[in-house]
Protein backbone atom coordinates (compact mmCIF):
# COMPACT_ATOMS: atom_id res chain seq x y z
CA UNK A 1 0.00 0.00 0.00
CA UNK A 2 1.37 3.37 -1.00
CA UNK A 3 1.62 6.04 1.64
CA UNK A 4 -0.65 9.07 1.36
CA UNK A 5 0.85 12.56 1.17
CA UNK A 6 -0.04 13.07 4.84
CA UNK A 7 1.96 10.05 5.96
CA UNK A 8 4.84 10.88 3.63
CA UNK A 9 5.10 14.35 5.16
CA UNK A 10 4.82 12.94 8.67
CA UNK A 11 7.57 10.42 7.95
CA UNK A 12 9.67 13.23 6.46
CA UNK A 13 9.30 15.31 9.64
CA UNK A 14 10.34 12.35 11.76
CA UNK A 15 13.32 11.47 9.57
CA UNK A 16 14.64 15.04 9.44
CA UNK A 17 14.23 15.42 13.21
CA UNK A 18 16.33 12.28 13.77
CA UNK A 19 18.86 13.32 11.13
CA UNK A 20 19.29 16.81 12.58
CA UNK A 21 19.64 15.40 16.07
CA UNK A 22 22.31 12.96 14.89
CA UNK A 23 24.48 15.51 13.06
CA UNK A 24 24.16 18.02 15.92
CA UNK A 25 25.42 15.45 18.41
CA UNK A 26 28.30 14.23 16.25
CA UNK A 27 29.57 17.31 14.41
CA UNK A 28 29.12 20.24 16.82
CA UNK A 29 32.91 20.43 17.15
CA UNK A 30 32.99 21.39 13.45
CA UNK A 31 30.42 24.21 13.43
CA UNK A 32 30.89 25.24 9.79
CA UNK A 33 30.72 21.68 8.48
CA UNK A 34 27.67 21.13 10.70
CA UNK A 35 26.01 24.13 9.06
CA UNK A 36 26.36 22.45 5.67
CA UNK A 37 25.02 19.17 7.05
CA UNK A 38 21.95 20.91 8.47
CA UNK A 39 21.13 22.92 5.34
CA UNK A 40 19.17 20.13 3.59
CA UNK A 41 16.61 20.03 6.42
CA UNK A 42 15.02 23.49 5.96
CA UNK A 43 15.37 23.20 2.17
CA UNK A 44 13.51 19.89 2.03
CA UNK A 45 10.85 21.07 4.50
CA UNK A 46 10.32 24.28 2.55
CA UNK A 47 10.01 22.36 -0.71
CA UNK A 48 6.99 20.53 0.72
CA UNK A 49 5.23 23.89 1.13
CA UNK A 50 5.74 24.49 -2.63
CA UNK A 51 6.42 28.22 -2.61
CA UNK A 52 10.04 29.30 -3.26
CA UNK A 53 9.54 32.95 -2.26
CA UNK A 54 7.86 31.94 0.99
CA UNK A 55 10.68 29.47 1.66
CA UNK A 56 13.35 32.17 1.30
CA UNK A 57 11.53 34.68 3.51
CA UNK A 58 10.77 32.09 6.19
CA UNK A 59 14.39 30.96 6.15
CA UNK A 60 15.75 34.49 6.53
CA UNK A 61 13.20 35.48 9.20
CA UNK A 62 13.96 32.50 11.43
CA UNK A 63 17.70 32.53 10.69
CA UNK A 64 17.88 36.11 11.97
CA UNK A 65 15.33 36.16 14.81
CA UNK A 66 16.26 32.81 16.32
CA UNK A 67 19.99 33.52 16.81
CA UNK A 68 19.24 37.07 18.00
CA UNK A 69 17.00 35.61 20.69
CA UNK A 70 19.64 33.03 21.61
CA UNK A 71 22.34 35.71 21.76
CA UNK A 72 20.25 37.57 24.35
CA UNK A 73 19.85 34.34 26.32
CA UNK A 74 23.60 33.63 26.21
CA UNK A 75 24.32 37.19 27.36
CA UNK A 76 21.69 36.71 30.05
CA UNK A 77 23.55 33.65 31.33
CA UNK A 78 20.92 31.02 30.51
CA UNK A 79 23.23 28.78 28.46
CA UNK A 80 26.65 28.70 26.77
CA UNK A 81 27.88 27.06 23.56
CA UNK A 82 31.08 25.04 23.80
CA UNK A 83 32.29 25.82 20.26
CA UNK A 84 31.02 28.81 18.27
CA UNK A 85 33.65 28.52 15.58
CA UNK A 86 35.18 31.84 16.58
CA UNK A 87 31.88 33.73 16.35
CA UNK A 88 30.53 35.64 19.36
CA UNK A 89 27.86 33.95 21.48
CA UNK A 90 26.26 31.47 19.01
CA UNK A 91 27.63 29.24 16.22
CA UNK A 92 26.61 29.77 12.58
CA UNK A 93 24.70 26.49 12.43
CA UNK A 94 22.25 27.99 14.90
CA UNK A 95 20.82 30.08 12.03
CA UNK A 96 20.06 26.96 10.00
CA UNK A 97 18.63 25.09 12.98
CA UNK A 98 16.13 27.89 13.66
CA UNK A 99 15.28 28.07 9.95
CA UNK A 100 13.84 24.55 10.27
CA UNK A 101 11.07 25.65 12.62
CA UNK A 102 8.74 27.69 10.36
CA UNK A 103 8.49 25.16 7.49
CA UNK A 104 8.30 22.22 9.92
CA UNK A 105 5.51 23.80 11.98
CA UNK A 106 3.53 24.98 8.96
CA UNK A 107 3.95 21.55 7.39
CA UNK A 108 2.50 20.14 10.61
CA UNK A 109 -0.49 22.44 10.21
CA UNK A 110 -0.92 21.13 6.68
CA UNK A 111 -0.70 17.52 7.85
CA UNK A 112 -2.96 17.63 10.91
CA UNK A 113 -5.34 20.51 10.18
CA UNK A 114 -5.33 20.29 6.37
CA UNK A 115 -4.70 24.03 6.17
CA UNK A 116 -2.32 25.83 3.84
CA UNK A 117 -0.04 28.61 5.02
CA UNK A 118 -2.23 31.75 5.29
CA UNK A 119 -1.67 34.32 2.58
CA UNK A 120 -2.88 37.30 4.62
CA UNK A 121 -1.32 39.32 7.41
CA UNK A 122 -1.15 42.85 8.77
CA UNK A 123 1.49 45.02 10.35
CA UNK A 124 -0.23 45.01 13.74
CA UNK A 125 0.03 41.22 13.99
CA UNK A 126 3.60 41.29 12.74
CA UNK A 127 4.51 43.84 15.42
CA UNK A 128 2.69 41.76 18.04
CA UNK A 129 4.77 38.68 17.18
CA UNK A 130 8.02 40.65 17.25
CA UNK A 131 7.11 42.36 20.51
CA UNK A 132 6.12 39.00 21.99
CA UNK A 133 9.50 37.48 21.12
CA UNK A 134 11.36 40.37 22.74
CA UNK A 135 9.15 40.49 25.82
CA UNK A 136 9.27 36.74 26.39
CA UNK A 137 13.06 36.74 26.07
CA UNK A 138 13.41 39.50 28.65
CA UNK A 139 10.98 37.86 31.07
CA UNK A 140 12.62 34.44 30.82
CA UNK A 141 16.08 35.90 31.46
CA UNK A 142 14.90 38.07 34.35
CA UNK A 143 12.90 35.30 36.00
CA UNK A 144 15.68 32.72 35.77
CA UNK A 145 18.39 35.10 37.01
CA UNK A 146 16.20 36.03 39.97
CA UNK A 147 15.61 32.38 40.79
CA UNK A 148 11.93 32.84 39.98
CA UNK A 149 9.30 30.28 38.93
CA UNK A 150 10.31 30.37 35.25
CA UNK A 151 8.41 27.18 34.38
CA UNK A 152 5.18 28.55 35.81
CA UNK A 153 5.73 31.93 34.18
CA UNK A 154 6.46 30.31 30.82
CA UNK A 155 3.37 28.12 31.06
CA UNK A 156 1.19 31.15 31.81
CA UNK A 157 2.68 32.94 28.80
CA UNK A 158 1.96 29.95 26.58
CA UNK A 159 -1.65 29.75 27.74
CA UNK A 160 -2.01 33.50 27.21
CA UNK A 161 -0.71 33.19 23.64
CA UNK A 162 -3.30 30.54 22.82
CA UNK A 163 -6.05 32.63 24.45
CA UNK A 164 -5.06 35.75 22.53
CA UNK A 165 -4.77 34.12 19.13
CA UNK A 166 -7.67 31.66 19.47
CA UNK A 167 -6.25 29.75 16.55
CA UNK A 168 -6.01 25.98 16.02
CA UNK A 169 -2.77 26.35 14.08
CA UNK A 170 -1.20 28.22 17.00
CA UNK A 171 -2.26 25.53 19.45
CA UNK A 172 -0.88 22.77 17.23
CA UNK A 173 2.45 24.59 16.82
CA UNK A 174 2.70 25.00 20.58
CA UNK A 175 2.37 21.25 20.92
CA UNK A 176 4.80 20.44 18.11
CA UNK A 177 7.60 22.87 19.00
CA UNK A 178 8.27 21.46 22.52
CA UNK A 179 8.52 18.00 20.95
CA UNK A 180 10.81 18.99 18.08
CA UNK A 181 13.15 21.08 20.23
CA UNK A 182 14.13 18.50 22.87
CA UNK A 183 14.45 15.74 20.24
CA UNK A 184 17.02 17.85 18.44
CA UNK A 185 18.74 19.20 21.54
CA UNK A 186 19.06 16.33 23.98
CA UNK A 187 21.72 14.20 22.22
CA UNK A 188 23.79 17.30 21.40
CA UNK A 189 23.68 18.53 25.00
CA UNK A 190 24.67 15.09 26.24
CA UNK A 191 27.60 15.22 23.79
CA UNK A 192 28.74 18.57 25.23
CA UNK A 193 27.68 20.98 22.45
CA UNK A 194 26.28 23.46 24.98
CA UNK A 195 25.17 23.54 28.58
CA UNK A 196 22.52 25.29 30.62
CA UNK A 197 23.22 27.27 33.75
CA UNK A 198 20.68 25.23 35.72
CA UNK A 199 20.49 21.48 36.16
CA UNK A 200 18.68 19.43 33.52
CA UNK A 201 15.20 18.26 34.43
CA UNK A 202 13.61 17.10 31.15
CA UNK A 203 15.61 15.27 28.46
CA UNK A 204 18.89 17.10 29.30
CA UNK A 205 17.04 20.45 29.37
CA UNK A 206 15.80 22.70 32.17
CA UNK A 207 12.03 22.39 32.50
CA UNK A 208 11.48 26.02 31.47
CA UNK A 209 12.68 25.17 27.95
CA UNK A 210 9.44 23.29 27.26
CA UNK A 211 7.17 26.38 27.39
CA UNK A 212 10.03 28.42 25.90
CA UNK A 213 10.06 26.26 22.77
CA UNK A 214 6.27 26.44 22.58
CA UNK A 215 6.30 30.23 22.67
CA UNK A 216 9.37 31.10 20.61
CA UNK A 217 8.92 28.42 17.96
CA UNK A 218 5.30 29.43 17.40
CA UNK A 219 5.93 33.18 17.37
CA UNK A 220 8.84 32.85 14.94
CA UNK A 221 6.75 30.61 12.67
CA UNK A 222 3.95 33.19 12.68
CA UNK A 223 6.34 36.09 12.17
CA UNK A 224 7.94 34.41 9.16
CA UNK A 225 4.52 33.68 7.62
CA UNK A 226 3.40 37.28 8.09
CA UNK A 227 6.65 38.66 6.68
CA UNK A 228 6.06 36.57 3.55
CA UNK A 229 2.38 37.57 3.28
CA UNK A 230 3.19 41.26 3.62
CA UNK A 231 5.99 40.98 1.08
CA UNK A 232 3.38 40.06 -1.52
CA UNK A 233 2.04 43.61 -1.26
CA UNK A 234 -1.58 42.50 -1.42
CA UNK A 235 -3.57 45.56 -0.35
CA UNK A 236 -6.69 43.44 -0.25
CA UNK A 237 -5.29 41.23 2.50
CA UNK A 238 -7.77 40.97 5.31
CA UNK A 239 -6.77 42.10 8.78
CA UNK A 240 -6.68 39.02 10.90
CA UNK A 241 -5.27 37.71 14.13
CA UNK A 242 -2.08 35.67 14.02
Image (cartoon, rainbow, N blue to C red):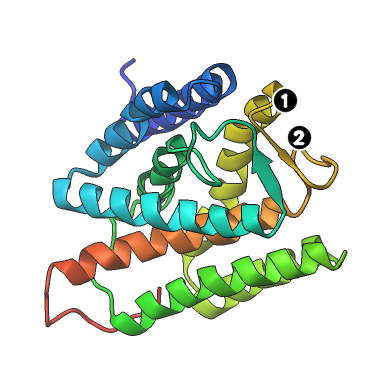
Q: Are marks 1 and 2 in contact (CB under 8 Å)?
A: yes
Label drawn at residue 204: 2
Q: Residue at x 66, y 25 (%)?
A: 187
Mark 1 and mark 2 lie on one chain; the one further toward the N terminus is 1
Residue 202 figure quarter:
top right
The answer to whether 219 is drawn above or below residue 240 in the figure is: above
Q: Position of residue 109 (x, y in %)?
A: 40, 51
Can residue 174 be seen? no
Task: Write down the residue under mark 1.
Answer: 190
Residue 100 figure quarter:
top left
Q: Circle 1 — which element?
A: helix
Q: Circle 2 — which element?
A: loop
- Distance of label 1 from label 2 (alpha carbons): 7 Å
Please rate how many residues cluster around mark 2, counting C-alpha atoms within 10 Å: few if below 14, some from 14 to 19, many from 20. some
The answer to whether 240 is drawn above or below residue 84 in the figure is: below
Residue 42 figure quarter:
top left
Can residue 173 be seen? yes
Looking at the image, which is closer to me, 62 or 142? 142
How many discs mark residues in the rendered view?
A: 2
Looking at the rendering, in which quadrant would you find the N terminus? top left
Outermost residue, front side: 86
Q: Residue at x 13, y 67 (%)?
A: 232
Looking at the rendering, in which quadrant would you find the C terminus? bottom left
Q: Position of residue 130 (x, y in %)?
A: 44, 72
Q: Position of residue 31 (x, y in %)?
A: 47, 27
Amino acid sequence: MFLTEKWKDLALLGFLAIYSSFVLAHFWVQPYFLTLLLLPAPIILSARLQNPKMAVIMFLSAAILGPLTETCCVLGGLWTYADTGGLPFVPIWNCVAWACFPPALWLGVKIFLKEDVPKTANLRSLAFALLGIGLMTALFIYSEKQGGPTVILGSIMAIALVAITRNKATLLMMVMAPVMGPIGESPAIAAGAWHYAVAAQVMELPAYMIPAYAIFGTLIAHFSQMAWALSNGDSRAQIRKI
